[in-house]
Image (cartoon, coloured by chain):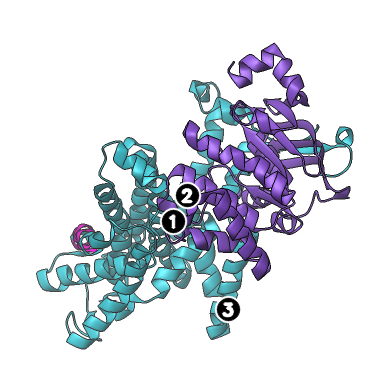
Chain colours: A cyan, B purple
């Protein structure tokens, strides 16, 4: 507000013509529209597919690339629960640890090869996680966050105190992957599967119901849908990428210990989601792609690393709480111009 | 005196308020009538300063861009850029649409929160005034506000707004969803507030009939613009307005 109206101008935000056209059948009218639609997707997929090849001269950075995919999976799980289901999960480490230990057991006790142990562990792990979280699903608000925060701590102490699952030592000598290429592409395709699968799901009928639970659970009940059952399904879906990440990781390093339930694994995905942009599912992956290399680059700073980390995160929350992905997609889809009022 | 001069509000590219100018004199009661989407609530947000808060939140969230033009003046002083809580301290208090009580706090606590900045004696005296004006609340003091009926909640909302010691009260759709008999009780508090406490009131409503006897001057809004304004008598004499807003 301020000076007289007539001299005022305001900034107008308008959808780009190409965006509007490519939402309809006109998307197929020319290569320009097709290109507009698929370029970001192709770039994203190509970047991941080329990563192992480009990083192959530097084994250390290849590993960093894989850690990034692991974090991306955990972040997708967090983003899905927080921004589509409305459940704030502070225990990504729980999914991760359960998946990891399950796969370790399948491999060391039953002798299943990694490529079989990982998918089975993902499913069994997700069932276990869902069953353990089920009691707090009928509740609203902070309860889910508290329980998910407690479970990883509980598991750590339980394993330590009762000396089960290998105790503090954990399991060693878990079978690795047959070649570095299988290892890298298996993880990348796993990430694609969960990312694009969940992105598809949230726009389907099932996803619609899940999103509605976040907005207004009473109205969902009024539509004859069981809120608790919907949440249960959603938690199962969210545990899948988390358990997959844990199961995959232990085969990469051939061991698993109580560090699989470390608090870092719950906090980092939240940071990745905040930076990348919540509610987009792609955003968390981008957040992870920035955070993990940053964190490696800061390794020399020792424990000060966490300070830089915290500052970056706080900066994003305070100044750009919508996250990178939301800003970028808006710039891609809309343009701005000054207009006279 | 409260004055809005040529206020315009854009929600993204949608014009919600188009060049609105209204004046509310000291100890006056002003009505703003219009259908849904007329811009009544946006006008109340602009007057109370809540719009600045919404604007900031949307900006941080990456949501709608809200653009504001024009001026809001209180007693000749420009308060356009003053935040909502500072406007409330200057006596410009909003009683928001759909009441927005603190549902888990009791009625007494709701009132106490409203009177947080008032002195102890002011708070006590205002509570007594509210309880006298709405005797139904007396028995409900310790009940959680979220479990009260719609009418009782509206009474608490008005009470809470009065606790902040306003000189000007902005009542946004106080009769929303109330039974005619309850509407009566709520609407009769307006002249009482004016007479006994010297507070000016700006009240918005979709259906003007229950409110019109108590306003001095009214504005009729449609699609963000004022289409007609006048004293109570002028509006009641206009057959078109009568049919559209007074249902008679």
Mark 1 and mark 3 in contact? Answer it, CB < 8 Å.
no
Above or below residue B241? Residue B147 is below
The segment highlighted magenta reads A117-129
Helix, strand or loop at label 1? It is: helix
Q: Nearer the viewer, residue A110 or A96?
A: A96
Mark 1 and mark 2 in contact? Answer it, CB < 8 Å.
yes
Q: Nearer the viewer, residue B232 or A326?
A: B232
Helix, strand or loop at label 3? It is: helix
Q: Is residue B125 left or right of residue B151?
A: right
What is the chain identity of the residue bearing mark 3? Answer: A
Q: Is residue A143 left or right of residue A295?
A: left
Q: Which residue is mark 1?
A: B139
Residue B141 pos. (x, y %):
46, 59
Quadrant of residue A108 within the rendered picture: bottom left
Q: Is residue B172 left or right of residue B105?
A: right
Q: Residues within 10 Å of mark 2 (few under 14, many from 20)?
A: few
Q: Residue at x 11, y 73 (%)?
A: A109
Q: Which residue is mark 3?
A: A307
The numbered dot on residue A250 is none
Of the two numbered discs 1 and 3 in the rendering, the one whose residue sits closer to the viewer = 1
The N terminus of chain A lies in quadrant: top right
What is the chain identity of the residue bearing mark 2? Answer: B
The image shows a total of numbered marks equal to 3
Q: Residue at x 77, y 40 (%)?
A: B28
Task: Give the spatial CA distance, label 1 vs label 3.
Answer: 54 Å
Quadrant of residue A111 within the rendered picture: bottom left
């Amino acid at each position: 507000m301020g000076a007289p109206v007539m001299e005022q101008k305001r900034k107008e935000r308008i959808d780009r013509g190409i965006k509007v056209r490519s939402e309809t059948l006109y998307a197929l009218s020319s290569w320009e529209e097709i290109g507009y639609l698929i370029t970001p997707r192709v770039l994203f997929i190509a970047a991941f597919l080329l990563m192992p090849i480009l990083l192959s001269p530097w084994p250390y950075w290849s590993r960093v690339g894989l850690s990034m995919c692991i974090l991306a999976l955990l972040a997708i799980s967090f983003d899905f629960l927080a921004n589509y289901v409305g459940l704030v999960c502070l225990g990504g480490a729980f999914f991760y640890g359960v998946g990891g230990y399950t796969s370790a057991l399948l491999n060391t006790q039953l002798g299943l090869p990694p490529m079989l142990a990982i998918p089975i562990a993902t499913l069994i792990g997700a069932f276990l996680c869902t069953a353990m979280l089920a009691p707090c699903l009928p509740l609203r608000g902070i309860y889910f966050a508290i329980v998910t925060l407690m479970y990883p701590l509980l598991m750590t102490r339980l394993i330590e105190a009762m000396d089960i699952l290998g105790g503090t030592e954990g399991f060693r000598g878990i079978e690795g992957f047959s070649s570095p290429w299988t290892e890298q592409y298996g993880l990348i395709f796993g990430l694609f599967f969960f990312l694009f699968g969940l992105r598809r799901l949230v726009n389907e009928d099932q996803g619609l119901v899940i999103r509605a639970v976040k907005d207004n659970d009473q109205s969902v009940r009024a539509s004859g849908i069981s809120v608790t059952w919907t949440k249960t399904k959603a938690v199962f879906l969210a545990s899948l990428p988390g358990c997959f990440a844990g199961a995959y990781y232990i085969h990469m390093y051939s061991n698993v210990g109580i560090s699989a339930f470390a608090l870092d694994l719950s906090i980092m995905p939240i940071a990745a989601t905040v930076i990348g942009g919540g509610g987009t599912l792609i955003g968390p992956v981008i957040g992870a792609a920035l955070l993990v290399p940053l964190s490696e680059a800061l390794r020399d700073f020792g424990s000060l690393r966490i300070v830089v980390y915290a500052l970056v995160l706080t900066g994003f929350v305070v100044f750009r709480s919508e996250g990178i992905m939301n800003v970028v997609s808006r710039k891609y889809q809309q343009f701005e111009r000054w207009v006279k009022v | 005196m409260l004055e809005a001069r040529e206020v315009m509000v854009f929600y993204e590219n949608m014009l919600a308020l188009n060049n609105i100018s209204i004046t509310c004199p000291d100890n006056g009661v002003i009505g703003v009538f219009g259908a849904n989407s007329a811009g009544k609530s946006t006008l109340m947000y602009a007057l109370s300063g809540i719009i600045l808060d919404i604007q900031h939140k949307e900006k941080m969230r990456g949501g709608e861009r809200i653009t504001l033009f024009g001026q809001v003046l209180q007693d000749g002083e420009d308060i356009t850029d003053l935040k909502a809580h500072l406007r409330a301290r200057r006596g410009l208090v909003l009683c928001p649409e759909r009441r927005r009580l603190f549902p888990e706090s009791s009625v007494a606590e709701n009132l106490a929160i409203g009177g947080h900045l008032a002195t102890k004696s002011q708070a006590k005296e205002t509570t007594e005034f509210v309880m006298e004006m709405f005797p139904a609340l007396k028995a409900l003091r310790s009940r959680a506000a979220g479990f009260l009926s719609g009418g009782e909640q509206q009474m608490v909302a008005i009470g809470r707004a009065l606790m902040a010691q306003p000189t000007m009260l902005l009542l946004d759709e106080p009769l929303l969803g109330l039974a005619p008999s309850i509407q009566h009780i709520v609407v009769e508090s307006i002249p009482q507030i004016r007479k006994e406490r010297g507070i000016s009131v700006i009240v918005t409503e979709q259906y003007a009939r229950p409110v019109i006897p108590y306003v001095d001057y009214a504005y009729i809004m449609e699609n963000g613009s004022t289409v007609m304004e006048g004293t109570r008598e002028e509006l009641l004499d206009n057959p078109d307005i009568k049919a559209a807003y007074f249902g008679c």
